[in-house]
Image (spheres, grey):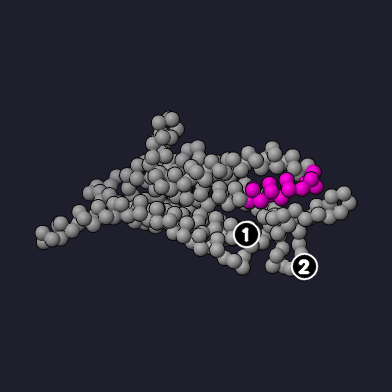
Amino acid sequence: MLDMLDTVPLRSRILDHAEYYARWSGLAIGLVVAQGLSTLGDVEFEQRVVFCITAFGLCAVAGVLLADALTLRPQEAVRTASLAPRLVRDHVPPRMGPLIALQGVSLVALLVITAATASVDPDRIFSTGKVLHVTCNGMRAPLGPWPGLYYSLPMFGALAVATPTCVWALRRIADGPGEKQQRHDRAWAVTGAWGLLVSSQQLYAVLMVTVSLTETGCAGALGALTFWVFYPLALLNLFTVGWSLVTVVAPRAVENETTKDGTGNDE
């Protein structure tokens, strides 16, 4: 009996830190997988980068979801119900949450536009979407690498898997048991993981478009669009990647900084 009583606190201490280990392990595994994918010799460089970014983002999301599943819930003797319903928006970052959601929408729009404008090669159907053809001085010239379906299919697949899973996790966190601070930490970590996937994918897609439109003088008005739209968008995504990475590692630290600025929401 004494052994059992001694074992319970030890198990609780281990499980109490399991969520941190799971989040960090997701990032570490993502780096290992990305390193392995980067050495694929029979795949061109741009496609390898897409695979690396997508795999790293999915591993980060998986680590956060595993961490949420391992988080200890307090065993309350008496549970009381609040009259006010719990909303997901009250648990996600008040500023970065809507921004990351907007980035997700803009990423899908960007990938759809680039897929629709990419050149189609009937003779090489599996390479369709690698370049964009424009008319320059009366002659057709290819611009690439262009994030058409050849490069964007893995991104679409990752978003299709991660987005509903993260939405379900946020809904589960908002409705589930646990202290308010604990629920906020878990929700911020999920938001950061999905933001890491979205912002890293959009950053690379924007860089591909920027390189394609600026490597030649045939882009025309699209070159000006690069300066006014894609450069600022790349900087925004770079900031979001950093914020998301820090949030996955230490969500409470980021949340506390936001609360100090007076942006924290009370339930």
Residue 117: percent from left, percent from top: 74, 54
Label 2 neighbourhood size at 10 Å, few (<14), some (14-19), many (20+)? few
- Specify the farthest residue to the bottom: 123
The magenta segment is 205-220
Q: Considering depth in this image, is 3 or 77 the residue closer to the camera?
A: 3
Residue 144: percent from left, percent from top: 72, 54
- C-alpha distance separating marks 2 and 1: 23 Å
Q: Measured along the vertical axis of the image, is residue 5 above or below residue 207? A: below
Q: Measured along the vertical axis of the image, is residue 84 above or below residue 165? A: above
Residue 106 visible here = yes
Q: Measured along the vertical axis of the image, is residue 91 above or below residue 133? A: above
Specify the quadrant that holds the N terminus. Answer: bottom left
- Do residues under tags 2 and 1 come within 8 Å of each other at their CB atoms? no
Confirm whether the magenta stretch covers residue 68: no
- Residue at the (51%, 63%) spot, across then down: 36
Q: Is residue 182 left or right of residue 193?
A: left
Q: Which mark is residue 122?
A: 2
* Quadrant of residue 145 within the rendered picture: bottom right
Q: Which residue type carries mark 1? A: Phe
- Residue at the (77%, 48%) spot, across then down: 216
